Amino acid sequence: MLDGSYFIGQGIGSKEFRNDPAFHGFGWSNNRERLQAIYTTDESFKTFIDRICETINVNSHKLNELLLAQHYMLTHWQKVDDQLNYRRFFTINGLISLAMEKDAVFEGYHTLIENLVKNNTFNGLRIDHVDGLKDPGLYFDKLRARTGENTYIIVEKNS
């Protein structure tokens, strides 16, 4: 998250909280626990959050505003090919049947990625939907072997 973005409520907007590296993409479980602790111990924060949730729950326009402010767009899977834009610039439909556990498939889909990492165009990779892989552990072992120990690899979704 960018400095100060999406931080709401008493305490969360403080400079100390915003600059805490543990809050910026690392340890969602810890962050969720921290937010829950603030919610259960700070009555003004709880009231503030409850009021926001109630407003969104009873006003579909407010919910729509919230959804439109996200860095993604919810789209029905059957309409995705018609709604590609800067938020959704590819579809997964063509990737669904890939047998990534097969060496030839893995090699074919990762040669460009390996080259981009080796020439320092990329220094990190975000891997999404590993829950669809037959063997996620094997996939990451192979990916690490191709990209090296210094490549930052983060998993977006793990069922």
Image (cartoon, rainbow, N blue to C red):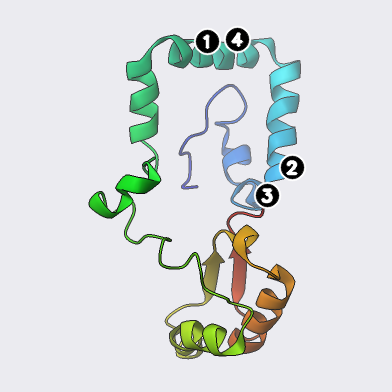
Q: CA distance from mark 2 to mark 3?
A: 8 Å
Marking on residue 30 = 2
Q: Which SS class for mark 1?
A: helix
Name the residue rendered at 69%, 36% in the picture.
Answer: 32
Name the residue rendered at 56%, 22% in the picture.
Answer: 9
Q: Which SS class for mark 2?
A: helix
Amino acid on which the number 2 mark rests in the picture? Asn
Amino acid on which the number 3 mark rests in the picture? Ala
Residue 154: x and y, percent? 61, 64
Q: CA distance from mark 4 to mark 2?
A: 22 Å
Q: Decide: marks 2, 3 in contact (CB < 8 A)?
A: yes
Question: Could you tell which of marks 2 and 3 lies nearer the N-terminus?
Answer: 3
Location of mark 3 (residue)? 22
Q: CA distance from mark 4 to mark 3?
A: 26 Å
Q: Which SS class for mark 3?
A: helix
Does residue 117 appear anywhere in the picture? no
Location of mark 4 (residue)? 47
Question: Could you tell which of marks 4 and 2 lies nearer the N-terminus?
Answer: 2
Q: Is residue 56 above or below residue 2?
A: above
Question: Position of 135 compared to 99: left or right?
Answer: right
Q: CA distance from mark 4 to mark 1?
A: 6 Å
Question: Could you tell which of marks 3 and 1 lies nearer the N-terminus?
Answer: 3
| Foreground pick, 28 / 22 | 28
Location of mark 1 (residue)? 51
Q: CA distance from mark 3 to mark 1?
A: 27 Å
Residue 23: x and y, percent? 63, 45
